[in-house]
Every structure is written in structure tokens, then in C-alpha cells.
Amino acid sequence: MRALVLEGDFGIDNLKLKDRDVPKPGPGEVVLKMKAGSLNYRDLATVTFGGNPKLLPMVPLSDGCGEVVEVGEGVKRLKKGDRVAPSFFQGWQSGGPVAENLGPTALGSPIDGCAQEYMCLSAEGMSKAPANLSDEEVACLPCAGLTAWRALVVEGGLKAGDTVLVQGTGGVSIFALQFAKAMGARVIVTSSSDEKVERAKKLGADASINYKQTPDWEMEARKLTGGRGVDHVVEVGGADTFPRSITAARVGGHIAVIGILSGLTKDVNVAAIFAQNLKISGITVGSRTHFEEMTRAIEQNDIHPVIDKRFPLADAQEAFRLMQGASHFGKIVLDI
């Protein structure tokens, strides 16, 4: 079988197609024939920024969709022919996050990810795919979709009439826009591109802020809410945008901290956090139970992920460079 492998050193140029043996399932495991995978910023960071060289060689991509083609002894919850999405965290099925169920069980490093034709995983580490979505659309859900769902619904308690500020038009932000509108919320989108803003409005965005034209976008967000501030901020920007998100949020508002696009550390006005009684949630994807809840909402509301561009597995380097250039709107998909 073909697998996209990062070997030798970190960097997009070191992604190569390799031949590997098709795996066999052990007790409690299933083999998947992978249909599609999608890229997240986390995949780009894993491939380019480096990490522990002892993890190389590795197969990237935390997100994918596959069909069960072989079932190991003792598996009851899945059968041959089922379409499934592997969980980002293979060890987190339910309940709250605990250390041993997070980083050590993540697909795409340290566990080999979805950019391969066949995968063998625990039957507990995947969920059945939403029936209304194509394979390529399902492949967009496990990281970006579930991150947005947990940020707004699980941790944020999103309700109809709330105002949500989403930063940018990447995968998580577009999912947040779609989920918020499905639940009757008002959405403000920030972007540096008027073209992307118009596309977001077609998806239901109620207002927009071009942060290149309006650098103090947090003050504009307050104006758009009559000075009150927004109920939720989907904070994907990182260190440079987080202080502005604090200003944009209402008293008692919620900030879901997800991304690190602008950096990791910066001075923060702690007094503003407690004076405004803000709830700050760190979000690293979610559990299998969260995914299954999200699936019901996707089917009920017929929500479809926004795919910017698809590439064959052989053109994975080009797909990663598109992600690196940050010009995409929604998700980038690899056909496997």
C-alpha cells in the first residue's frame, strides 16, 4: 500500500510516498481502507516546525475518512462496510480530558496518521460517519469540525441569540460559523480579505471586519454589539490576538483558545479577565462522544464542510504549501 511518510528530517520537501505492508487487525482492532484525509494547521506544524526526531519516520494527517474492510476478534460496535472517521485522540472516548488520553494517543504524531491507504486502529478510536456527507466531507470533521463544536457547544454553551466572533476563514472558523448559524446565533467574521468576507456572508455571516482596514477590530466588534461585546470568541490567532479578544468579549463572555498562528506567548491583562468575569477555555479537539453529538447536529441540519481544494495523495507537498500560504477558505483535502 502507499503511505505518505515524513522521514530523514522535518520539512515539506521530506514528505515522500512509500510502499508499506497492509496491516492485519489484532483483537479489538479494525483495518480501514482510507478514502480521504484533510489538512489542519497542526499537521503543517508537525511537518515543518519539527519535534522529536525519534518519531521519524511518521505518517502525517490527523483527519480522515475510511471504510472498515477487516474486523478483529471481539469487535462489536463496527462491521465491514461501515464508513468511519478515526478519532483525533484515539484514547479519549468520553468524559473530560486527562493527560494519558490526549497527546500520547494523537493521530498524525505520535501515532501514524491518515495519509495512507490502509490503517489499523482500535475499534474504540473511531465514529461512524454522518450519513449526509461524502467521504471527503467526513475527512474534514475529526479535528477542525470537532474543535469548533466543542468550543461553542460543549464548553461555550452556545444558544440562540448569542453573538459569536470568529477569527479568519480557516477550517475551525468556518465550522464555527456554520454551527453557530444552525443554532440561531449571530456571527461576526474577521478577515484580511474582502473576497473571503463575501464568501463567509454567503454562508450566513451577519457582519464582518477587515482587520487590515480596521486594525482595532476588537473595538469594531464592540460597536457591532452596541458596546456590549460578543458572547463568544473563537480565538485561533494566538498571542497577538488574544489581548484583543479579551476586549471584544462581553462581561461574562467566553473565549475559546484554539490557535497559535501569531505566536505562543505575550503579556496578558489578567485584571481584565477577572474584572469581566470571562470564561477562558483551552480547546484541543474533543472526545468520541462529542463527535457523535456533533454528527447528530450535522445530519439534522444538513451541514456540509466547505472544501477549498482537493489534491491526490501524490501531490501532498503542494497541498501542504497551500496550507502554509494561508490563502485557503475552509478545508484542504487529500484524496487517498
Image: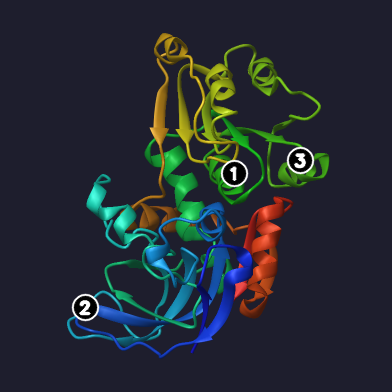
Q: Tag 1: residue type?
A: Ser
Residue 306 position, x and y percent, is 65, 57
Q: Count all numbered tags in the image, as a single digit.
A: 3
Q: How is the image coloured?
A: rainbow
Of 336 and 229, which appears nearest the observer? Answer: 336
Badge 2: few (under 14), some or many (20 or more) residues near its Cα, within 10 Å? some
Of 69 and 109, which appears nearest the observer? Answer: 109
Tag 2 or tag 1, which sits nearer the N-term?
Answer: 2
With respect to residue 36, does 250 lie above or below?
above
Report helix, strand or loop for mark 3: helix
Tag 2 or tag 3, which sits nearer the N-term?
Answer: 2
Q: Which mark identifies residue 216?
A: none
Q: Quadrant of residue 72?
A: bottom left
Q: Tag 2: residue type?
A: Gly
The Cα atoms of the two marked residues, 1 and 2, are separated by 35 Å
The Cα atoms of the two marked residues, 1 and 3, are separated by 12 Å
Q: Residue at x 32, y 75 (%)?
A: 121
Residue 96 position, x and y percent, is 26, 44
Q: Are marks 1 and 3 in contact (CB under 8 Å)?
A: no
* Residue on which disc 1 sits: 173
Residue 162 position, x and y percent, is 53, 28
* Residue on which disc 2 sits: 28
With respect to residue 221, does 67 lie above or below?
below
Report helix, strand or loop for mark 2: loop
* Residue on which disc 3 sits: 197
With respect to residue 2, does 146 lie above or below?
above
Tag 3 or tag 1, which sits nearer the N-term?
Answer: 1
The quadrant of the image that shows the C terminus is bottom right
Residue 235 position, x and y percent, is 54, 34
Q: Residue at x 82, y 39 (%)?
A: 194
Q: Tag 3: residue type?
A: Val
The Cα atoms of the two marked residues, 3 and 2, are separated by 46 Å
